[in-house]
Image (tube, rainbow, N blue to C red):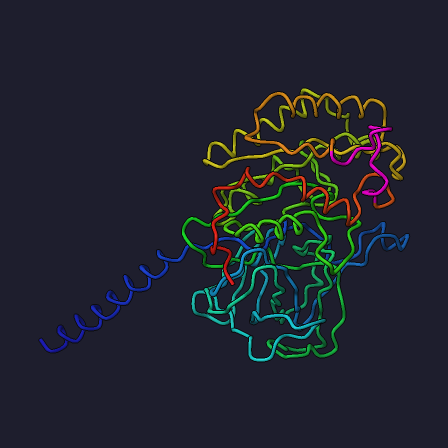
């Protein structure tokens, strides 16, 4: 009889703890404050790289600590991260993780470090193709502030399994000397890398009405030719405007250099990655799409298929609209920027320009998107409307400069997301 009572008490204790934990989790409204789109990078040189020496050298980790810097949009007092092995073909062992406020360079603010756990465990293994969400920790992060995420990778990643990364970070990140250096104020033997590895999202607990806008795009959204380490991508400038207006909505940059709507290439197509990069974002309420210029130019440049017709490009965008609306999201779009004279040989053609013009006219007149921003009108030279205005041109006549990216953000009508802009809701 006594044993039955003890078992009942033990079960009652376990059962009693469950609802309390569940109730706390249910009360936490998680929203993305930073995100990046995962890409596949080789862990070994390709045959072409080995023979010619061309191409970026693959990064390999072996018993090292990565310190990766991300810039928040929303602030909050409780945070968690999402790690990814999306493109890996072998399990990825994470020997430990921490999060802290960044000081400068590779240094973190002393005393700000928090150990990250995964289902209560300090280590974890991410299966091939999977993601891993950490447990939440208490850490007050500011809006528009830098956070450092440490990952200890105890194994050797030089196996043939691709590494999941984002190469167009425009942010210096750090790789330690041998060993676990989680939470060290200064990272020993720090070498630099311009990429993010295995890290796809930072989230904060936010008020219930707080949402997030996902910026789905190509290199123009990813910030190509913006000044590294200065957060001069146009979504960064938009985040500043949003926070100044009261916050209430996270700004998540899911741009990929060279990405296309209809075809794979630099990353899978926008149509193929929409569920993973848009719909899976916690708290997403809005989507903003600026894609299509690479559908016109890259296919002609690399001759990997025929250039899509205007009707085909529009059909691709209609699919994005339908999929967003099916999840109750508002979806916004933009006209394609002018690009005649681009320094990429063969990228601009008269045929591609005709499609761009017709596509932009559809964008302006169809009202199929819930709202649009006419970036073409903002960025074009009025005397040569097929070319970018010189003061906004980074020099390659395709990508804006820092000033151009700021002009794009300034042209964004905040009324399109006004329901998310609530005084006092932007966190710390």
Q: Is residue 349 left or right of residue 92?
A: right
Q: Position of residue 301 (x, y in %)?
A: 84, 34
Q: Is residue 387 magenta?
A: yes
Q: How many marks?
A: 0
Q: Is residue 234 magenta?
A: no
Q: Is residue 395 above or below residue 260?
A: below
Q: Position of residue 245 (x, y in %)?
A: 56, 50
Task: Please identify the quarter of the rendering in which residue 262 is found.
Answer: top right
Task: Please identify the quarter of the rendering in which residue 339 is found.
Answer: top right
Q: Is residue 347 left or right of residue 207?
A: right
Quarter of the figure that contains the N terminus = bottom left
Q: Is residue 373 left or right of residue 337?
A: left
Q: Please tell me which residue is depicted at 16% across the width and 70% down the height of the picture.
A: 8
Task: Please identify the quarter of the rendering in which residue 373 is found.
Answer: top right
Q: Please tell me which residue is depicted at 55% across the width and 37% down the height of the picture.
A: 416
Q: Which residues are magenta?
A: 378-393
Q: Please tell me which residue is depicted at 77% across the width and 50% down the height of the picture.
A: 402
Q: Please tell me which residue is depicted at 71% across the width and 35% down the height of the picture.
A: 375
């Amino acid at each position: 009889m006594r044993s039955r009572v003890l078992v009942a008490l033990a079960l009652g204790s376990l059962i009693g703890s469950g609802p309390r934990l569940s109730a706390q989790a249910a009360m936490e409204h998680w929203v993305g404050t930073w995100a990046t789109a995962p890409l596949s990078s080789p862990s070994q040189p390709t045959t072409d790289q080995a023979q010619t020496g061309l191409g970026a050298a693959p990064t390999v980790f072996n018993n090292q600590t990565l310190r990766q810097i991300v810039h928040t949009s929303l602030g909050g007092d409780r945070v968690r991260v999402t790690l990814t092995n999306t493109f890996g073909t072998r399990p990825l062992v994470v020997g430990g993780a921490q999060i802290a406020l960044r000081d400068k360079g590779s240094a973190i603010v002393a005393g700000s470090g928090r150990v990250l756990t995964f289902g209560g465990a300090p280590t974890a293994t991410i299966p091939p193709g999977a993601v891993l969400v950490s447990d939440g920790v208490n850490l007050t992060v500011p809006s528009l502030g830098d956070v450092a995420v440490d990952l200890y990778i105890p194994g050797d990643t030089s196996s043939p399994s691709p590494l999941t990364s984002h190469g167009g970070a425009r942010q210096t990140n750090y790789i330690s000397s041998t060993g676990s250096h989680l939470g060290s104020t200064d990272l020993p033997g720090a070498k630099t890398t311009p990429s993010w590895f295995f890290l796809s999202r930072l989230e904060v607990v936010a008020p219930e009405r707080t949402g997030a806008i996902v910026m789905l795009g190509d290199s123009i959204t990813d910030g190509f030719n913006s000044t590294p380490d200065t957060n001069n991508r146009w979504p960064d400038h938009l985040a500043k405007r949003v926070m100044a207006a009261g916050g209430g909505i996270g700004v998540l940059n899911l741009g990929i250099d060279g990405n296309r709507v209809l075809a794979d290439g630099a990353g899978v197509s926008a149509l193929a990655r929409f569920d993973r990069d848009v719909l899976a974002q916690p708290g997403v309420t809005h989507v903003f799409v600026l894609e299509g210029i690479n559908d016109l130019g890259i296919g002609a440049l690399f001759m990997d298929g025929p250039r899509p017709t205007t009707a085909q490009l529009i059909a691709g965008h209609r699919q994005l609209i339908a999929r967003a609306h099916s999840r109750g999201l508002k979806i916004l779009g933009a006209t394609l920027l002018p690009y005649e004279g681009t320094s990429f040989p063969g990228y601009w053609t008269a045929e591609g320009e005709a499609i761009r013009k017709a596509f932009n006219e559809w964008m302006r007149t169809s009202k199929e998107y819930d709202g649009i921003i006419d970036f073409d009108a903002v960025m074009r030279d009025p005397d040569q409307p097929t070319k970018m205005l010189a003061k906004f041109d980074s020099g390659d006549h395709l990508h804006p400069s820092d000033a151009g990216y700021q002009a794009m953000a300034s042209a964004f009508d905040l009324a399109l997301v006004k329901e998310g802009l609530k005084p006092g809701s932007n966190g710390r």
